[in-house]
Every structure is written in C-alpha cells, then in structure tokens.
C-alpha cells in the first residue's frame, strides 16, 4: 500500500489480513519460516498503522513496529481473528520476535519445529 497518502483504517486491516493469509499458506505448505515471520511482521505493522490512523495519527513512513507500539501509547494490544481474541502483542513479545527473526536470518531451518506444524 502506498504510504504517500493516508488510507482508511479498514484498508490497512485488510492488507494485514492478507499478510496473515500469506503466512498461513506458507506454513501449511512448509514454506520458509523467515518468510512467514516477514509476513507476520508486515501484518502487525499494518494493523498498528490502521489503529493509529483511526485515532487521527498522521501517516508517517515508518516500519519500526516497536516505535509504532510506542506511538499507540498502549502496553498491550489484542490480536483478533474472526472476531475472537487469539493473542496479545506486547513490547516484550515483539522484542522476542525480532530476536528470533534476526537469529533465523535468511537461513532455511533444517527441521520444522513442532509448534509450526
């Protein structure tokens, strides 16, 4: 989505949903975990931007999820899927995610972890 003009929050949420769908497809097809992590990060970024725009935040070209969470002024954000709470995003689990993503780098995992099945 171009970031030169602000899109309605629903557009950002729809884009985030597509990134989650891509991550789900990749997982189902034994796709590379670093690519799954990338689409997951993209979804979180788009959901945060959608939320911020809904509060009047002027769109900025920023891709740092940690800064976006700080801009929200919240410590925990709900993760909703199909109208149900499926998780919580906190600064701590974003940090853990970024460390895992960094450790994975561009290497394909030798064996899929049991949690990714």
Image (cartoon, helix red, strand yellow):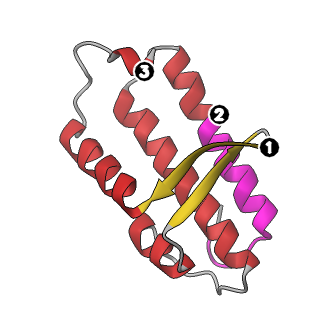
- Which is nearer the eye, 46 or 78? 78
- Which of the labelled discs sits on residue 83, or is there none? 1
Q: Is 77 in the magenta?
A: no
Residue 3, image x, y percentages: 62, 72
Quote the CA–CA distance across marks 2 and 3: 15 Å
Q: Earlier in the sequence, mark 1 or mark 3?
A: 1
Quote the CA–CA distance across marks 1 and 2: 16 Å
Residue at (75, 76) in percent of width and height = 54
Residue 115, image x, y percentages: 40, 20
Q: Main secondary structure of the magenta part?
A: helix
- Which is nearer the eye, 36 or 87? 87
Disc 1 versus disc 2: nearer the observer: 1
104 left or right of 62 in image = left
Q: Secondary structure at mark 1?
A: loop
Quarter containing the N terminus: bottom right
**Residues in magenta, as a range:** 3-20
Eyeballing the image, is 50 above or below 38?
below
How would you rate the neighbour count of disc 3 (Cα within 10 Å): few for under 14, some for 14-19, many for 20 or more? few
Residue 30, image x, y percentages: 44, 15
Q: Earlier in the sequence, mark 1 or mark 2?
A: 2
Residue 27, image x, y percentages: 50, 22
Q: Secondary structure at mark 3?
A: helix
Residue at (50, 55) in percent of width and height = 89
Eyeballing the image, is 60 above or below 47?
below
User: Which residue has dot 2 on it?
Assistant: 21
Quadrant in the picture for residue 110:
top left
User: Which residue has dot 3 on it?
Assistant: 116
Residue at (34, 47) in percent of width and height = 97
How many tags in the picture? 3
């Amino acid at each position: 989505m171009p970031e030169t003009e602000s899109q309605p929050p629903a557009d950002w949420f729809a884009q985030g949903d597509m990134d989650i769908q891509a991550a789900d497809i990749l997982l189902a097809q034994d796709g590379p975990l670093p690519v799954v992590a990338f689409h997951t990060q993209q979804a979180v970024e788009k959901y945060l931007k959608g939320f911020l725009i809904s509060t009047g935040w002027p769109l900025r070209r920023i891709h740092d999820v940690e800064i976006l969470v700080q801009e929200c002024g919240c410590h925990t954000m709900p993760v909703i899927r199909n109208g149900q709470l499926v998780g919580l995003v906190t600064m701590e689990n974003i940090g853990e995610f970024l460390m895992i993503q960094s450790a994975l780098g561009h290497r394909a995992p030798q064996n899929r972890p049991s949690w990714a099945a």
